[in-house]
Image (cartoon, coloured by chain):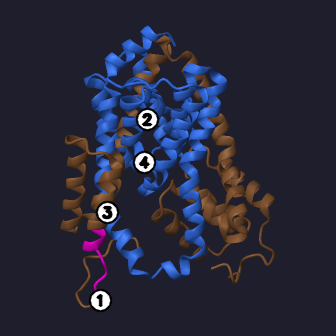
Chain colours: A brown, B blue
Amino acid sequence: MTESPAPGTTPSPPGLRQLFTGMLMVALSAFGGGLSAWSQRIIVEQRHWMSNEEFLTGLTVARLFPGPNQINMAVYVGTFFRGLPGALAALAGMLLVPFTLLMGVGLLYFQFHTLPALDRVLAGVVAAAAGMALSMGFKILDQYWKDPMALVLAAVTFVLMTFFHVRLVPLVLVAGPLAMAWYWPRPSHPPAPQGERR
Amino acid sequence: MPAVLIAVASAATSCTPMRLNDLGHLLQVMGTFLGLSLFSLGGGNTLLTEYHHLSVEQYCWLRPSQFADIYALAEAAPGPSSMIVGLLGMGAGWPEGPGWALLSAYGAEIAILLPSTLLMVVACLSWNRLRDSPWRVAFERGLGPITLGILFAVGVKILKTADTNAAGVVVSLLVCVLMLRTRISPLWFMAVAGGLGVFGLINR
């Protein structure tokens, strides 16, 4: 994937410093959300580093592999041009400002969280955040709706974790290979209904 | 932190704090997150129940309400919400002072990101071979439903940890529906709910 730049990309690929500043721009633009939309705008449309197709491949890889999606995306962009050093430069650019800011917020929180006024605000904010957490599962439920086995797997996983307090690591290590065996591509049989991610 | 307070905290949450020196504590934090990194499926939120277990129930880094606070802060702050690990590390190091708390925060964030980053680099470099491999197909399709189940478990866990009054739970459910049905920025929900907290309508 690194061999031939597609038409529309610049002939000279970005260096480490450009990767750092590019991802810094993405992070700064995305204050308030829409990180992956902003990275597409800046990387594909403004700087022409990648074709749209290359970018979308990156999103696929970033979602597939472990790790936070947006951070994996930065790693993909960095690796695409400069290998591991590029990945680290892109990662640093993406995290520098938000993480520094979060550290400031964190220090203030641990210093002052016992103040009653702050605790009252946080009690409300926490309720909203819990609603956001609750919506995460529903957000991806649609794509599994027509696959009964997927729903069974999801339900068993949920019950084991919520009611039997099974920990994540053993659960994934046991259920993961079983689910992979079930979904192993079988050319002779019609495959189970495709997800909508293709 | 005086021993009495630790005893009280552990009695309340049934976690058992380990008596480690500063450096030992930092290494414990980093080792914990290094081991979890490769299990962050589906964008990293799948690890939240595990974060809760480790930081509240196992190592006494945080009280349950603090965990809920930190989750909300990480969601509200700009940038990837997986930076919550930095805040967990900060909580772990806080009893040793702000300096150690910061060190612990950076250590935790680096530890959670390093293994997945290295794997991602390898994946990018060998994507042409991986793309059509049956392993890739089976991994993507098999782990998807498990991720779905984990995310529902995470939602319930966070809701329980938030532990607000009935009005708070109603707000949580309402926000959940609004998140799915509208494209309103979640920051608005947090701001409004924070206001309800100030007026005492939501409490815990």
Q: CA distance from mark 4 to mark 1?
A: 34 Å
Residue B177: in sight, yes or no? Answer: no
Q: Which residue lies at the image location 52% right of the left edge and 28% below the top edge?
A: B92
Report which residue position mark 4 lands on: B45
Q: Are marks 2 and 4 on the same chain?
A: yes
Q: Which mark is residue B189?
A: 2
Q: CA distance from mark 2 to mark 4?
A: 20 Å
Neighbor class of circle 1 (other Cα within 10 Å; few <14, some 14-19, many 20+) is few
Judged from the image, the secondary structure of the residue bearing numbered disc 2 is helix
Judged from the image, the secondary structure of the residue bearing numbered disc 4 is helix
Q: Is residue B170 left or right of residue A3?
A: left
Of marks 3 and 1, the one in the foreground? 3
Of marks 1 and 2, the one in the foreground? 1
Report which residue position mark 3 lands on: A176
Q: Are marks 4 and 3 on the same chain?
A: no
Residue B195: in sight, yes or no? Answer: yes
Q: Position of residue A85 (x, y in %)?
A: 72, 61
Identity, as a three-letter code, of the amino acid under mark 1: Pro
Q: Which residues are magenta?
A: A179-186
Q: Is residue A184 magenta?
A: yes
Q: Are marks 2 and 3 on the same chain?
A: no
Identity, as a three-letter code, of the amino acid under mark 4: Asn
Residues at circles 4 and 1 in contact by the CB criterion of under 8 Å: no
Report which residue position mark 1 lands on: A187
Q: Are marks 1 and 2 on the same chain?
A: no
Q: Position of residue A187 (x, y in %)?
A: 29, 89
